[in-house]
Each structure stands twice: as structure tokens, then as C-alpha cells.
Amino acid sequence: MALGLLILAAAQAASPTGDLMESRIRAADTQFWAAFNACDREGMTAWLDPAVEFYHDKTGATVSRERVAASFMDGPCGSKDLHMRRAPIAASLHYDPIPGYGGMLTGRHRFYARSGDQPEKLTTEARFAVVWHQAGDRVLISRVLSSTMATRCRTSPYARCQSRPTRWRGSSGIMRPTRATSTSACPTGGSSSPRAG
């Protein structure tokens, strides 16, 4: 009986819960996306489970650490003349625990593109859900869901314009841009409001 209680106590100590798990996951998420923005393959793969599954509404399913990393390196990081940057929308971020497993971060994020020495432009906004699980003393990404949103701007109650997101072509789970950057039809000074795409 005493031995059973000791084993249970040790297991609970090794499995952080509540605020500790949330802070671990949020810190890991920040590091993963910093690696994404830097096109750091090793930095990204360090946070991916070997059997990670990535589901995207435009490119389909990509499964395994190596294929997900390759999709980032060949897609958003695939051109020397194009740099993509991901920025979370802080007010949209939400954490939910997954008891006995880890936790899930959901929200919206925006992607910006800079072509050569041109100014950075907003290319797309997406909803996301990232599932993290505990693996020993670390947390790893096991599932990702991403759904693209278009960005619209309104200059009057009767006029609308829409910025077109960079399009990605999936081939064997690899994401590749079909054009270098998007061009927005939104005039300078137009207010933007996201619309589900």
C-alpha cells in the first residue's frame, strides 16, 4: 500500500498540472514560433512529436516530424527572396488543459510576407488549434489544425475590398507558394475586419 502511494506521488510529481503545465506549453509555443519565424529547422523539429499530424484547410494533412518540418522549409521558408513572419493575435489566444495528456492552445494568428527589400505585407489570417502533450520532462506538439481566413477592409458601408492571401500548393504534403506575395486591393487607411474564409 505504501509503495503504491509512493509510485502515485512520483507520477503526479512528474506530471505537471494546472498553471505549471500551461506556462510550460505557452513557453514552448513561443519558442516553436520563434524558430518558425527564423526558418530554423532544428529549432522547429525540437518541438514536434515524431508522429505529429498537421491539418490545413488548403494543403491537407501532413504527418510526421520530418514531413511537417519539410513543408515549412520548402513552403514559407523555401524562397531566399521571400520571408514569412507569424504573429499571434494576443487577445484571441486561449489555453485548455487536456487531463492526463497536456493542453491545447487555440486562437488566431497573422502571417506577413516581405519580398526582397519591399515593405512587409499582411498575407493571411488563420484560426488554429495546437495540441501539446507531455513527453518525459518536455512538451511536444502532437496535432495542429489550421483554417485560413481572408482579411477584408471596408472604406464605406457600400465598398469592400479584400486582400488575397498567399496561395500554397500542396504536393505530397509539401506547401509551396504559387506567388511571391499578395497584393492588397485595400486602399491605404482602410479599416480591416477579418472574415472567415
Image (cartoon, rainbow, N blue to C red):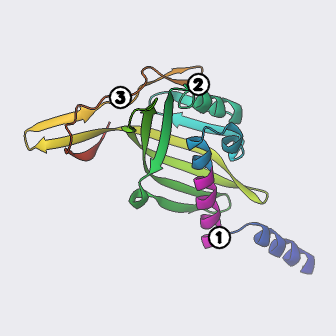
Mark 1: amino acid: Leu
Which numbered disc covers residue 182? Answer: 3
Look at label 2 and name its amino acid: Gly
The stretch of residues the image draws in magenta is: 17-31
Residue 179 left/right relative to 54: left
Tell me: residue 189, above or below residue 5.
above
Q: Toward which corner of the image does residue 65 lie, by quadrant? A: top right
On-image quarter of the C terminus: top left
Residue type pointed to by label 3:
Ser
Query: Hey, which residue is sitting farthest bottom in the picture?
Result: 2
The residue indicated by pointer 1 is 20
- Judging depth in this view, the residue of 108 and 2 nearest the camera is 108
Give the quadrant of residue 157: top left
Residue 135 image point, x, y percent: 75, 54
Q: Position of residue 149 (x, y in %)?
A: 35, 39
Q: Residue 21: x percent and y percent?
A: 64, 66
Q: Is residue 197 above or below residue 89?
A: above
- The verdict on residue 46 being magenta is no
Q: Which residue is mark 2?
A: 173
| Sequence-earlier tag: 3 or 2 | 2
